[in-house]
Image: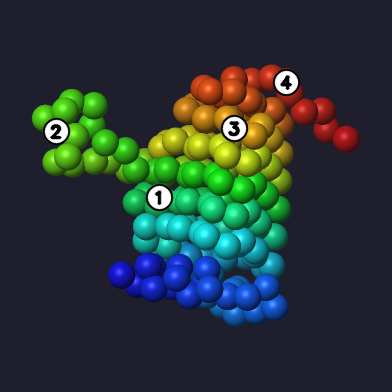
Amino acid sequence: MRASKLVRQLNQLSFDEIDSQEGLLKELFGSVGENPCVEDNFHCDLGYNIHVGNHFYAGFNCTMLDMAEIRIGDNCMIGPNVGLYTAGHRISPKNRNKDGYAIPITIGSDVWIGGSCVILPGVTIGDHSIVAAGSVVTKDVPKNTIVAGNPAKILRNIEEV
């Protein structure tokens, strides 16, 4: 109930109330670095399982199912319509509605996640990586890597500049 109330307040803020947004994010999330920005229509389950570093940005319609921890490093950009899902359900139809599970998601620093991506339970995305728009990430992404597709596959490494 607490998260739902704070998320509703967050989503009703106007553009010029950016200072109020930072205060609400600090109340909602487990920890927040400097200069966070979350666009309209953000959703999460609990809030306190979300930890973001400095200069975090989440585009419109970001959904974080944070039944387990979601840890995001510094200078990360998340495009619009992205889902980070720590929660899942059993495969067996008999048990699917009885119990679920949650596995943490970890996103390193300087990561860019393109629009309409889905990050599934247990995934770790290494520092400096890029997830191309529309990707479904089912496995860990090494640092300095570009991935794309459904399921996401490695396209190439990123050279240090």
Residue 31 horizontal/vertical position (percent): 52, 65
Dot 2: few (<14), some (14–19), or many (≥20) neighbours within 10 Å?
few
Q: Relative to residue 65, is residue 90 drawn left or right?
A: left
Screen quadrant of the C terminus:
top right
Which numbered dot is residue 8?
A: none
Judged by depth in the image, the label closer to the viewer, 2 or 3, is: 3
Q: Residue at x 53, y 52 (%)?
A: 62
- For mark 3, give the secondary structure: loop
Q: Quadrant of residue 53?
A: bottom right
The residue identified by callout 1 is 65
The dot on residue 95 is 2
Q: Quote the CA–CA distance across marks 2 and 3.
A: 30 Å
Residue 122 falls in which quadrant of the image? top left
Q: Quadrant of residue 95?
A: top left
Disc 3 residue crowd, few under 14, some 14–19, many 20+, Cα 10 Å: some
Find residue 108 and report its horizontal and vertical position in percent.
61, 44
Q: CA distance from mark 3 to mark 4?
A: 17 Å
Q: Which residue is mark 4?
A: 156
| Mark 1 vs mark 2, CA separation in Å | 20 Å
Looking at the picture, does residue 104 appear above or below residue 42? above
Name the amino acid, label 4.
Arg
Return the x and y of residue 117 as percentages of the image width and height: 56, 37
Instruction: Classify mark 1: residues with Cα within 10 Å, few (<14), some (14-19) or many (20+).
Output: many
